[in-house]
Each structure stands twice: as C-alpha cells, then as structure tokens.
Image (cartoon, helix red, strand yellow):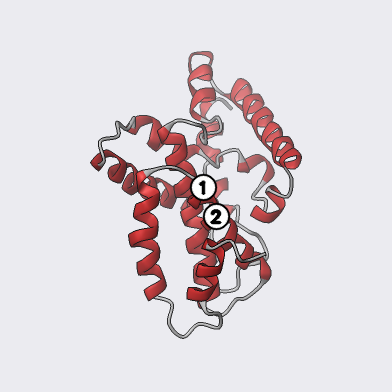
Amino acid sequence: MGIHAYLKSLTKLERIYRCPGEFKFEEHNVAAHSFKVAQYAQLLGTVEEMHGVEIDWKSLYEKALNHDYSEIFIGDIKTPVKYASPELREMLAQVEEGMTKKFVHAEFPEELRDIYLEKLKEGKDDTVEGKILSVADKMDQIYEAFTEIQKGNVEPVFMKMYKYSLMGIKEIDLHCVNYFFDHILDEMLKDSTNTAVDIHKLTANILENNME
C-alpha cells in the first residue's frame, strides 16, 4: 500500500482510547492527546526560550506529534501498568520500536525510510526537547486525571495517574517545570471547588512525598 498505509493509519489514533474502560466523564483518544501535547510543548518551549535556552522547534514539534504513534500497534497501556517495573517498560518499548520499524520498512518508499524511522522513534530523551516532551505528556495525564477527580471519579487509577505525573514532572530540571508549578498548577487548583476529593490536600501530600 505504500505511504498511503501510513496516512491511513493516522485515523486509528482517533479510535484508540486512553486508559480504556476507566474514564467515566470524558473519554480521550490518542490523536487528541498528541495534539494537546504539541500545544503544551509549544508553551513549555516558549518558557524555556524566554530563559535563554535554545530550542530546536522542528525536533520539538516532531517529538510531540509523533510520540504515541506506535500505539497503533499495541494500543494504550495504563500508566500504572506501563511503569510497574523497569523491565516491563523496556519490553513494551522494544515491542513498539520493533513493530514501528517493521511497518516503516514494509510501507515507506526507500528514500523516506531512514527519515521516518528517526521521526517516529521514542522522543523522550536527554535533549531539552525530549525533556519538554516528557513534561508535556505528563501535563496531559494530569489534566485527564484532574478532570475525572474534579467531577467525582475517585477510582484509584486516577489518583495514581495524578500522583505519578506530578512526581514525574517534579523530577525534571527545566525552567518550564517551575512555571508549571508556580502558575499552571496553581490556577488549576483554584478551579477545583466543590469536588468529592480535597484536591488541594491531595496535591500537597504528593508534592511533600507523604502519599504512599
């Protein structure tokens, strides 16, 4: 089928639901998630640039847009499961990478194969752009979990998603991380009135490492 197979496959991302079976109030698909992550990355990259950090915008946008493309092969795996052990995470990454490579070699014309193998590879690396992607990805997980908790869904999976994502962002050394905690999270918490869970207390416990 050639390059058409790749373009057609993008539609599958609209039908792959994140955290399948768990959302009660708002469902989220991988295509929408990738768009939002690109938007978050754009904001975070701008904050870094304001602090004098040089950003490779082409790399950042490609990483953000493509970071979950491989989920067309294995679907979305819930965050607590995906990170249950380093060994499991590594195995899943190898499966994703292997299936993506097989697809590219089978469907892409030869002159585009190496280019797209680079574009579709795991984007979360030690570069500034890779770190920004990590923050942006976790930001969307926070928003997904926050919305469910805010509307009364207190299932443990969303408590864990909220916790792991906050702690993950906290561990990344970027200017935009400070911006997230000083501005974005603060505004988010002000929007958390009349909820079944005291999100202010929950957040404070997480950030103080007091939540098991």
- Does 156 appear above or below 129? below
Q: Quadrant of residue 127?
A: top left
Residue nearest the viewer, comparing 64 with 105: 64
Kind of residue at disc 1:
Glu
Total count of labels: 2
Binning the other alpha carbons within 10 Å of mark 2 as few (below 14), some (14 to 19) or many (20 upward) gives: some
Q: Is residue 115 depicted above or below 207 in this figure?
A: above
**Mark 2 to mark 1: distance in Å?**
6 Å
In percent of width and height, residue 31 lies at: 50, 49
Looking at the image, which residue sits at the far top? 111
> Residue at point 38% right, 45% down?
41
The disc at residue 43 is: none
Q: In the visual, does 65 lie left or right of 122? A: left
175 vs 30, left or right, is: left
Are discs 2 and 1 less than 8 Å apart at CB?
Answer: yes
Residue 83 visible in the displayed image = yes
Q: Which residue is mark 2?
A: 167
Mark 2: secondary structure? helix
Q: Quadrant of residue 52?
A: top left
| Residue found at x 37% / y 67% | 186
Instruction: Between residue 36 and residue 154, name the one nearer to us.
Output: 154
Quadrant of the frame with the N terminus: top right
Badge 1: how crowded within 10 Å, few (<14), some, or many (20+)?
few
SS of the residue under disc 1: loop
Q: Is residue 26 something one can see in this rendering?
A: no
- Answer above or below: position of 126 versus 75: above
Seen in the image, is 148 located left or right of residue 59?
right
Residue 59, quarter of picture: top left
Residue 171 is tagged as 1
Three-letter residue code for mark 2: Met
* Residue 100, position as x, y percentages in the image: 62, 30
Residue nearer the viewer, 180 or 117: 180
